[in-house]
DNA sequence: CCTGCTACCTGATGGC
DNA sequence: TGCCATCAGGTAGCAG
């Protein structure tokens, strides 16, 4: 599920909760969550580690340890949970793939669908995924100029460019669609055909959509103690995503859904210009 | 190098 | 009801 705004909200909320604590024991209940690493190596590398900080890169959540780092990627359905009482994390009742028992409580990595991963890295460059990330969508380096440069480097449908983590890191299917709607640009539009004015509009739209999304994700803040909670009700903030057949919030034309790169793209063919 | 396709998983939903 | 197809906020790995 999570794209950069959700992961950023998790990062900020989790930071004060776990900074400075010690991972004492690690229970890998579903080894697939560690694949292709082994449960044993995750345990030996993270047990007794001190959590020095929490960071985000693209859609990755990073727990910086005194030795190396714990990198989590949630893919579609991954989430984290916090248990004040570690016994609750180990109870058979809720599905938890990995339990990190600490001196303060237990951190759980959960993914029913088993696509998400938690890996230990000696250094960040050891992960191909992290190494390959382009300009982070929330960083100062994500400027209008950089975006235009990427757009003009090769002809790519705008939606695919925005979703390519090697170019802009952090945008996913929802916020790429929302940004294009806001910029009034078609997802099919060839990136190298943008005028300066359109490039500026796209950059502004991405920044604005991400800013609002982060606000939305922080109010109310993530509640890691509640297993039923995980960024519910995003649709209250969305204008096009998931709204096939409904009237466009701007021009009332019917929102369409097409396939791009094997994913659904939602847009208004009337007011998003190609 | 780059681009495009499939696999990886599980669960919810809708049509027949 | 049951059964089957399709869909889901993503990326790694592979072929061309």
Image: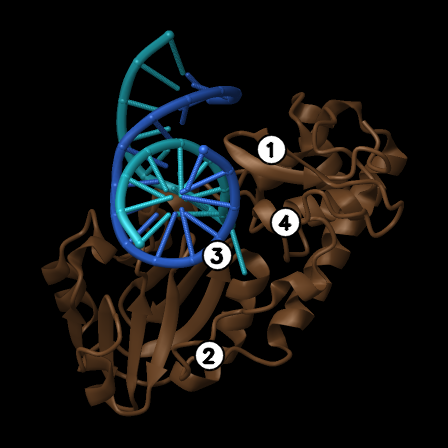
Chain colours: A brown, B blue, C cyan
Q: In the shown orientation, is residue A216 left or right of residue A227?
A: right
What residue did someone put label 1 on? A160
Across and down, in percent, residue A83 comes to 32, 86
Q: Is residue A10 above or below residue A82?
A: above
Determine the image quadrant of residue A212: bottom right
Q: Find the distance from the CA under tag 2 to the CA under tag 1.
A: 32 Å
What residue is at 13 percent from the left and 67 percent from the top?
A44
Labelled pair 4, 1 in contact (Cβ < 8 Å): no
Q: Earlier in the sequence, mark 2 or mark 4?
A: 2
**Tag 4, which chain?**
A
Q: Earlier in the sequence, mark 3 or mark 2?
A: 3
Q: Is residue A191 above or below residue A244?
A: above
**Tag 2, which chain?**
A
Q: Earlier in the sequence, mark 3 or mark 1?
A: 3
Q: Find the distance from the CA under tag 3 to the CA under tag 1.
A: 18 Å
> Is the residue at mark 3 from the same chain as the one at mark 4?
yes
**Tag 1, which chain?**
A
Residue A15: mark: 2
> Is the residue at mark 3 from the same chain as the one at mark 1?
yes
Labelled pair 3, 2 in contact (Cβ < 8 Å): no
Across and down, in percent, residue A214 comes to 65, 67
* Mark toward the viewer: 2 or 4: 4
Check disc 2: other Cα within 10 Å, few if <14, some if 14-19, many if 20+. Answer: some
What residue did someone put label 4 on? A242
């Amino acid at each position: 599920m999570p794209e950069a705004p959700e992961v950023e909200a998790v990062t900020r909320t989790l930071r004060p909760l776990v900074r400075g604590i010690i991972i004492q024991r690690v229970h890998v209940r579903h080894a697939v969550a560690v694949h292709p690493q082994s449960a044993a190596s995750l345990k030996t590398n993270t047990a007794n580690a001190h959590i020095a900080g929490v960071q985000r890169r693209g859609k990755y959540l990073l727990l910086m340890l005194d030795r190396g780092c714990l990198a989590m990627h949630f893919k579609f359905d991954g989430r984290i949970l916090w248990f004040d009482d570690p016994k609750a994390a180990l109870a058979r009742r809720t599905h938890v793939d990995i339990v990190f028992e600490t001196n303060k409580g237990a951190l759980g990595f959960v993914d029913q669908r088993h696509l998400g991963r938690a890996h230990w890295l000696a250094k960040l460059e050891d992960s191909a995924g992290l190494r390959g990330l382009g300009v982070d969508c929330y960083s100062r380096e994500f400027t209008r100029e950089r975006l235009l440069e990427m757009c003009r480097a090769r002809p790519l449908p705008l939606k695919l460019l925005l979703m390519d983590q090697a170019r802009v890191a952090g945008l996913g299917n929802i916020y790429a669609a929302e940004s294009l709607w806001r910029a009034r640009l078609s997802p099919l539009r060839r990136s190298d055909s943008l005028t300066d004015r359109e490039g500026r509009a796209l950059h502004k739209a991405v920044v604005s959509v991400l800013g609002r999304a982060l606000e939305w994700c922080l109010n109310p803040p993530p509640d890691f103690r509640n297993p039923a909670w995980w960024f519910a009700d995003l649709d209250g903030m969305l204008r096009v995503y998931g709204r096939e057949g409904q009237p466009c919030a701007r021009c009332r034309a019917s929102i369409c859904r097409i396939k791009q790169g094997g994913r659904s793209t939602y847009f208004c063919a009337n007011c998003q210009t190609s």
